[in-house]
Image (cartoon, rainbow, N blue to C red):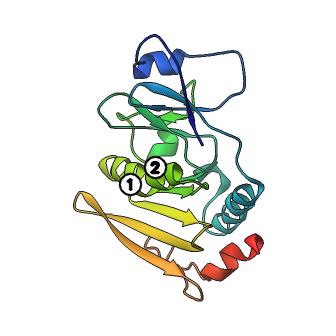
Amino acid sequence: MSQAITTQKLMTMEEYLAYDDGTDTRYELVNGELFELPPESLGNCDLARFLLIELLKFFPLTLLAYKDLEIEVTGRRAKCRLPDLVVHTEESRAALVDSKRNILTRDLPPPALVIEIVSPGAANRTRDYRHKHTEYAAREIAEYWIVDPETRQITVCQWVEGQYEDTVFVGAECLRSPLIPAWKLIIDQVFALQS
C-alpha cells in the first residue's frame, strides 16, 4: 500500500517536479502529499508486460509508456499519477519531445489510453476504481482500463460527454475498445499468467 511521506507543508506541482531525495523511489503526488509507491507484485508486473506486448501489435513502441510516464490530474490540491501503461496520442507524445521530464502536465494533450493494474488491498481498489476514475475522466483521457487480477476482470471506461461509461469484461469475453477495434484477446487469456 502507498504510504504518505511526512513533509512540513503540502507540496505544489512545481515543488513536486523539483523534488529529488537522491533515490530511485517512485512517488505520486496526491492532494499535495507525497506518496511512496511500493514495489509491484510479480503477478502485476507480469500482467503489465503481457499487455505491453499485446499493445505493441497495434501501436509503435514510441506511443507506449510502461511505468515511466507521469500524468498531472486535477484535485483539491496538486496531484500527479504514475499509471502502469499508457498509449499516447501523436499530440501527447510530440508534446514531450523537448521536455526535461516525462510528465503530461494539465496544459499538454491527454494520452489516448491509461491502464492501471489494481494492487491488493481496499485502499488500492478505491484509488483505481474511484479516485483515478474521476481524475482521468476530468483529464479527458479517451479510455481508462482497470485491470483487476483479484476479480479477473477488465473494466473499460470510455470518455463520453465529460464522464466515463464503464463496461466490464470477464471470462471468455473479448475486450472491446474503440481505440483498438481489432483486439482479439479473451479476458481469461489476459489472466492466464495468474493461474
Among all residues in the image, which is located at the extreme front? Answer: 122
Report x, y in % for residue 150. Answer: 61, 68
What residue is drawn where x is 63% and y is 40%?
A: 68
Q: Can residue 49 be seen in this snapshot?
A: yes
What residue is drawn where x is 57% and y is 38%?
A: 2
Report x, y in % for residue 36. Answer: 60, 31
Q: Mark 2 points at which residue?
A: 127
Classify the position of the C terminus by image quarter.
bottom right
Please report contact status of discs 1 and 2: CB closer than 8 Å, yes or no: yes
Report x, y in % for residue 51. Answer: 66, 64
Report x, y in % for residue 167. Answer: 40, 75
Q: What residue type is labelled 1?
A: Arg
Q: Can residue 112 be seen in this snapshot?
A: no
Q: Which amino acid does label 2 sit on?
A: Arg
Q: Residues within 10 Å of mark 1 (few under 14, many from 20)?
A: few
Q: How many marks?
A: 2
Residue situated in front as seen by the camera: 149 or 177: 149
**Which mark, by number, is residue 48?**
none
Q: Mark 1 points at which residue?
A: 130
Q: Residues within 10 Å of mark 2 (few under 14, many from 20)?
A: some
What residue is drawn where x is 57% and y is 40%?
A: 69
